[in-house]
Image: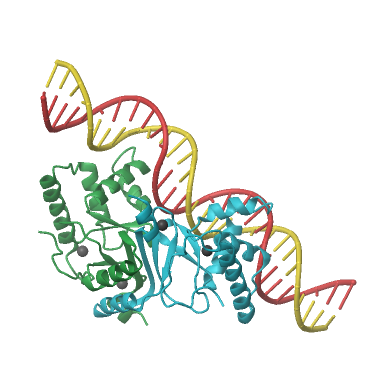
Chain colours: A cyan, B green, C yellow, D red
Amino acid sequence: MGKGNDHKARFAEDGHDHRRCIAEALETADALCARRGVRLTKLRRRVLELVWTSHAPIGAYDVLRRLSQEHDGAAPPTVYRALDFLREQGLVHRIESLNAFVGCADPAEAHTSQFLICQDCGAAAELQDPAINRALARSAGSLGFLVKDKTVELRGLCAHCRESGA
Amino acid sequence: MGKGNDHKARFAEDGHDHRRCIAEALETADALCARRGVRLTKLRRRVLELVWTSHAPIGAYDVLRRLSQEHDGAAPPTVYRALDFLREQGLVHRIESLNAFVGCADPAEAHTSQFLICQDCGAAAELQDPAINRALARSAGSLGFLVKDKTVELRGLCAHCRESGA
DNA sequence: ATTCAATGGTTATAGTATACTATTACTGTT
DNA sequence: AACAGTAATAGTATACTATAACCATTGAAT
Ligand SMILES: [Zn+2]
Ligand SMILES: [Zn+2]
Ligand SMILES: [Zn+2]
Ligand SMILES: [Zn+2]
């Protein structure tokens, strides 16, 4: 299965085999879409692959620039349509504070996650911390607020960049 | 002082005196800027007033449209500069998931807050819940992540719209 | 008065996202 | 084979959000 059945994800390790990250993400996506009866077309699959280029969220227009090199006539809607599909299927997440997209670490089932985003290396780690969700639910509940959707994004320095920096 | 010395803010009540909200926000801003020795110019003050038009976050270009009606030559930079100043002074917050701005309920000192945003009436309530901040700090800390900035935005239905809706 | 940094005006451009229309590819039906 | 229905993609234009770059003015401090 995918990389992330961990309850709590981590930042990818420094010298990790990222080709394997990508391959696993694509395999998981293939299996998931097959099971759901939705089509991970060549285009959508390629956009997913481009999003997985690194663990740093990538902008839609960066995806477009790369896609254009191999796909004549690629235009903004080409990318946004693919990203919309991938988001609907939970295969990518949007990072609101960056206007950018990142591959989901654990797309098997719907979930709300939190993101730690390193301002130095750009990498984003996806967490699913029940304690955070509990605290949010409590706070919203006490005001009678019905939560439909959550955005939790923390920006700062990951452990690695914190050490190597000053 | 301002409206919000509450530990936990609430959604503004249905028939509340919003003119008073605005007046208090402006008074607080005047006092705060005077104390800090920064200039809340006529333009900046007017932009703050426009942001406080309602408790719903407002887009920069909506501010611009209104400002243009009374201020010749208002252009995007006019508004963004004023908003930048107001954000630096903690007088307005940016809602990342809406690309919009909202007045701060308690600008007296720097703080990280959370937002509950009603998808029906548009209003945003600003919370400062220590339990949420604790949960976030714990989670980030356990990964050695140094948090510099937080975005916590929950979208859904406020108590009022939940009742009046279906 | 002189000076310098802060403020704002103006024009242009970058960056992000969607609306709208048309076409293609695949499916099953007649 | 001809047809209709559907999903996916193409193509064009436009809306929306934000910043760059350069210049004129203001206003507080010396
Ligand atoms: Zn990897
Ligand atoms: Zn990092
Ligand atoms: Zn009010
Ligand atoms: Zn509401």
Instruction: Identify the residue at horizontal 28%, vertical 43% (top origin).
Output: B70
Instruction: Identify the residue at horizontal 41%, vertical 61% (top origin).
Output: A96
Q: Nearer the viewer, residue B60 or A161?
A: A161
**Which of the 4 image quarters holds residue B136?**
bottom left
Percent across and percent down for residue B153 are 34, 67
Quadrant holding the N terminus of chain B: bottom left
Tell me: B75 left or right of C1.
right
Percent across and percent down for residue C29 are 78, 84
**Which of the 4 image quarters holds residue A79?**
bottom right
Please say whether residue B122 is visible from this viewpoint: no
Q: Nearer the viewer, residue A14 or C19?
A: A14
Quadrant holding the C terminus of chain B: bottom left
Q: Nearer the viewer, residue A55 or A103?
A: A55
In the rendered view, tell whether residue B10 sits above or below residue B104.
below
**Which of the 4 image quarters holds residue A67?**
bottom right
Percent across and percent down for residue B104 are 22, 59
Percent across and percent down for residue A91 are 54, 70
Instruction: Identify the residue at horizontal 55%, vertical 73% (top origin).
Output: A89
Ligand 3 quadrant in view? bottom left
Tell me: B105 left or right of C23.
left
Please say whether residue B21 is visible from this viewpoint: yes
